[in-house]
Every structure is written in C-alpha cells, then in structure tokens.
Image: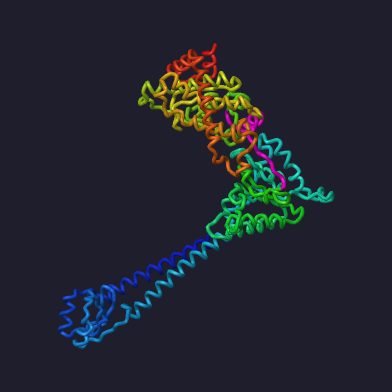
C-alpha cells in the first residue's frame, strides 16, 4: 500500500511540475510581452522611442523601447522599405528568425524535457507494474479451501479421472518406483457454469496443497512481453512451494491457435503462450506441481497446448444428467427450509440442460421469492416462479396497453408451438404456455422440455425445426399471409441454426453428404450458392408441412388459443386436458 502511495505521489509531482512549467511560460509571456497597435508603434518610431526591432516572417514583430526591459509585439507591416525606415530612424534591426529571448528558449526546453520525463515515467512505471505479475491478480489459497468433492454433486466420471492425480501429488514415490510420471497439466472443458473452477479447487483441497488461481485475460496486456513475464512470475511463485495446483481459467484468451505466416510469433498472445509452454516443459519430473486449465472451446486451442507433456489429460465437465441434477439440487437444498411438497427428482426432470450454476441461481431466486412473500418455506409455487424468471424473465404487471388483437396474435402463435410439440415430439413436456409478456421482451412463450438423451435423431431434429416454425404458421392460418407479424424473429433464428447444423455439421443432407464444413474450410460455413439454395428448399418444405399439420388439427389450435385468451396461462395438465 505504501509503495502504491509513493508511486501516486511521484505521478502527482510530475504532473504538478509540468503544470508549473506551462503556467510559468504563460506568466512570463503575459508579464514581459505586451501587444500594441501598429499606429502606436508608428508614433513611437517617429518620436524615436524605439531602440530595437526583431523582424520575422510571421504575423507579428517584437520590439523594445529605450530604457525598458519589456518586450512589445505589434503587427508585421511586411513592407519592402520597412527595414530602411527603421534604420533611418536609428533603430537597431535584428533579422534572426527566432522571435523569443534566451529566457524563452530556456522555458521551452524545460517544458519539452518535462513532457519527455512525464511520458517516460508513465511508461516505465506502467510497464514495471504490469511486468510484475501483480500478485493481487493471483489468488493464492492454501488452508482456506472449503470446496472438496463432498461439495460437488455430479461429474462422477470427472472425479474418477482426477483421483490418481490427487494420489500422485500426495504419494509421488508410489508411482515413481514404477517409472510413472505425473501428468503436467489437466484441461477441463465444457459449457459455461458446469463447475470447472469448483473441480480445480476440489483437486487442490483433496490433495491439501496451495491453489493458485488466475484468469487467462490477466496475461493479456498492451505492452508486448508483459504477458510472458507474468507467466514466468506465476510459475516462479508456485515453485516456492514443493507441491501446488496452478489454475488458469479461460485459457483460450492466450491459448488460441497461433498466427501463421511471416509475422508468426510477433503477437503478444503468441509470446505469452510460448512462455507458458516453456514453463510447463521446464517442470521437474514428479515435482508435485500440476497445472489445471479451463476452457469453453477446446476446438480453438493451439495443438502445442494439448499434446502429451503439456496438458496430457482432457476431462469434459458437461451438462449434468437427471441423476446429477437431482444430486446438485439436494446439495443446494441443504440448510434451506424446503416444503414437504417439493420433490428434488421432479425438479431435476424439469431442468434439462441446466448447469450447476443455473440450478444454484434457480434455487436462490426461489428463496428470494419466498422471502418476498413472507413465507417460512420454499414451495413449488416459489420454484415455479423462479424457474420462469430465470428462463423468460418476470411477468409484466401492467398489461393495460396490450390490445385484444395483440393478445389474439400471441395466443395463436403460442398455441401453434404447443400443438406441434405435442403432435411431433410427444416425449417432450410442455410445462407451461402463456401469453403474458415478460421483462425479457417475450410477448409470451411455450416451455418445451425435452427428455434426457445422448443423441438426437434426424426426425427429432426436423421436428425441432418445425416446432420453431409453428408460431408463424399458426399466425398465417388464422390471420392470413399478409398479416403475419414480427413475433417469429427469434423462432426463425433458432430454426436456421438447427437447419445449418442439420446440413453442415451432422451430415444429414443427401446433397452435401457426410462432411463437416468447419474441418474442410476452417470456418463454420462457406460461400456457396448451392447450400443456400438447398436450405431455402428445406425451410420452405418444413414450413408447409408444419402448416399442413396445424390445418389438419385446426379445432385443437382454436381450442388452445381460446383457452389462452381466457386463462392467459396453461400448465401441463390443463394443456393435456384439451387433447382429451
């Protein structure tokens, strides 16, 4: 803290000096330089009061009056006979190009030197501060770690894959006598919020070693070479301990595939990555220090990072399945007053594709809702409110400005989604359909919860596209082609994404075949009129088929829409009763 105050005082001193020099210059000019009119100058010249005149090419000339030290300025007449006139009046003429005195020279020099010192000091101090890893950016936790495997639900396979690492750190001799070397690094990858950081902390906790935590973005700085020096500083600090875990979150900030061509290695990120690779290669065998990195995008990382000897082991931390979700929910239910009616297994079934972080947020929102309502327990009602708050936002309270026509459009739009879901994806649960607008901008929504499964077959993917298109199709059936609305913009976006994956990622299009465009071109898509044409054909076909299904069940479409207009919200049981 004292060092920072000293640096701050140094900066303030430089700034004050700089301001003093500028102020001094202005004071000097204002005190010793006076502007007079050319008429006054002529009068002084004719009365022989002027001692010396300095000529210049500028718009002004300076002169001195006999018996005075001050310098005066007047307009430059730029007459051809001006010098002759001055000489005839016994005036000393100075034709040098400089219009300032020696004192002025000195002030200008001081000002330039001050500016130079100021800039140099800022760069030097900034580089020094950034060049030093800034240990405040490295979180070192030794004995304060509280998260162990007992506090992590799910991820059973991931836990099993790191058990030998923990044992290696604790008892290296057990492995070294068999010639086994400890992995240099572990790469944790998976979607955001799945618990990669928690897993890294748990490894350090279980191994009972210090935990060094830093983000990949901390290494990225304006000055070239600073990131590399930060990497060296981090490993130097960790090497002070016999055993430790170094955790680098968001490693893709520095670990992306390096640039190619003539300028390879000139980029700051490249130098930082090279420094990281060098430090990892420099580890002593079985030193007891392991590097754990986390990323959401394993596919964009540099191959040199992922090869054996660097990050030897790649462990996926994926979406929890239904059993893992139930275990996570039970973990977050601990120490909270939960009503007897609440079933963790039922909640787990409703939260497909929820990560651990999303489940924590859901239960926290339910607790806040219960507190706001003055309840002593968290009930299903609170969880349901929290669930839809997380997914779609809060319900808008003031709906007086919504016209009956808009309500009718929304009702048929959401009825279309719900009906096609029930007909084409009967395994999915439509847990809620509503026409109440939310704070996230939705006019209404249909909550479609798919079943937990490893794979999505071709017909299921096509059904998902048709579910997205069903809202627009229902609008066209009810109101006519010329009265479709902008409400389907997000649906069209989802349908387009699924169709793109259908054709270019999963190889389900017979024309394009079994190829992955990203592998062939290095991009997610490519410039080709052919596949754009084919995608239009597919989308039109799927849309017409969706419309035909809705027209074939027009009575159900009207029944669901009218029920929505009457009740505004239908739950799963109420929707199912309409089909009976």
Residue 262 percent coordinates (x, y): 59, 58
Check residue 295 for magenta coloring.
Answer: no
The reply, left or right, for residue 27 in relation to residue 364 is: left
**Chain part drawn in magenta:** 312-337
Residue 404 percent coordinates (x, y): 37, 21
- Here the colouring is rainbow
Rendered-image quadrant of the C terminus: top right
Residue 176 percent coordinates (x, y): 81, 51
Check residue 336 for magenta coloring.
Answer: yes
Quarter of the view holding residue 457: top right
Residue 135 to residue 50: above or below: above
Q: Residue furthest top?
A: 580
Residue 250 shows in the view: yes
Seen at 60% across and 25% down, the residue is: 460
The reply, left or right, for residue 32 in relation to residue 227 is: left
Depth check: 105 or 473 in front? 473
Depth check: 113 or 225 in front? 225
Seen at 31% across and 74% down, the residue is: 28
Residue 498 to residue 578: above or below: below
Seen at 44% across and 22% down, the residue is: 475
Q: How many marks?
A: 0
Residue 139 shows in the view: no
Seen at 65% across and 38% down, the residue is: 317
Residue 506 percent coordinates (x, y): 63, 33
């Amino acid at each position: 803290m004292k060092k920072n105050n000293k640096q701050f005082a140094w900066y303030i001193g430089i700034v004050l000096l700089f301001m003093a020099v500028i102020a001094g210059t202005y004071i000097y000019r204002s005190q010793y330089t006076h502007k007079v009119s050319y008429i006054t100058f002529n009068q002084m010249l004719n009365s022989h009061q002027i001692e010396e005149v300095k000529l210049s090419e500028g718009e002004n000339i300076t002169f001195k009056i006999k018996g005075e030290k001050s310098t005066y300025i007047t307009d430059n007449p730029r007459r051809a006979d001006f010098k002759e006139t001055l000489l005839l009046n016994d005036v000393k003429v100075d034709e040098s190009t400089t219009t300032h005195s020696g004192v002025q020279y000195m002030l200008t020099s001081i000002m330039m030197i001050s500016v130079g010192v100021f800039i140099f000091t800022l760069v030097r101090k900034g580089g020094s501060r950034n060049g030093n890893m800034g240990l405040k950016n490295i979180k070192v936790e030794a004995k304060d770690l509280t998260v162990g495997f007992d506090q992590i639900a799910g991820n059973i396979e991931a836990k099993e894959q790191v058990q030998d690492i923990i044992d290696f750190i604790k008892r290296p001799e057990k492995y070294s006598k068999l010639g086994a070397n400890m992995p240099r690094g572990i790469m944790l990858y998976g979607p955001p919020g799945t618990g990669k950081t928690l897993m890294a902390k748990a490894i350090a906790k279980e191994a009972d070693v210090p935990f060094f935590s830093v983000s990949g973005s901390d290494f990225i700085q304006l000055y070239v070479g600073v990131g590399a020096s930060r990497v060296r500083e981090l490993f130097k600090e960790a090497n002070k301990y016999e055993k430790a875990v170094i955790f680098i979150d968001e490693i893709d900030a520095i670990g992306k595939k390096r640039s190619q061509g003539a300028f390879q290695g000139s980029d700051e990120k490249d130098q930082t990555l090279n420094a990281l690779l060098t430090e990892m290669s420099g580890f002593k065998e079985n030193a007891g220090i392991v590097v754990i990195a986390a990323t959401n995008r394993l596919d964009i990382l540099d191959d040199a990072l992922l090869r054996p000897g660097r990050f030897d082991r790649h462990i996926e931390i994926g979406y929890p399945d239904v059993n893992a979700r139930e275990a996570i929910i039970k973990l977050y239910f601990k120490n909270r007053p939960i009503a007897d009616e609440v079933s963790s297994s039922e909640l787990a079934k409703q939260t497909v594709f929820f990560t651990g972080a999303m489940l924590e947020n859901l239960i926290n929102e339910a607790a806040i809702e219960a507190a706001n309502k003055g309840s002593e327990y968290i009930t299903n009602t609170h969880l349901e409110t929290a669930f839809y708050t997380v997914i779609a936002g809060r319900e808008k309270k003031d709906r007086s400005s919504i016209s009956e026509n808009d309500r009718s459009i929304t009702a048929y739009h959401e009825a279309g989604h719900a009906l096609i879901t029930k007909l084409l994806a009967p395994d999915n649960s439509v847990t809620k359909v509503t026409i109440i607008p939310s704070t996230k901008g939705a006019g209404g929504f249909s909550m479609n919860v798919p079943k937990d499964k490893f794979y999505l077959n071709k017909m299921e993917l096509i059904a998902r596209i048709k579910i997205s298109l069903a809202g627009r199709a229902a609008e066209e059936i009810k109101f006519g082609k010329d009265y479709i609305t902008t409400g389907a913009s997000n649906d069209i976006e989802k349908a387009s994404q699924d169709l793109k994956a259908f054709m270019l990622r999963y190889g389900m299009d017979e024309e394009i075949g079994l190829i992955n465009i990203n592998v062939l071109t290095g991009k997610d898509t490519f410039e080709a009129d052919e596949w754009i044409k084919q995608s239009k054909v597919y989308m039109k076909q799927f849309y017409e088929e969706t419309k035909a299904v809705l027209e074939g069940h027009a009575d159900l479409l009207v029944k669901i829409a009218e029920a929505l207009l009457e009740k505004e919200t239908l739950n799963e049981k109420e929707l199912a009763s309409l089909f009976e």
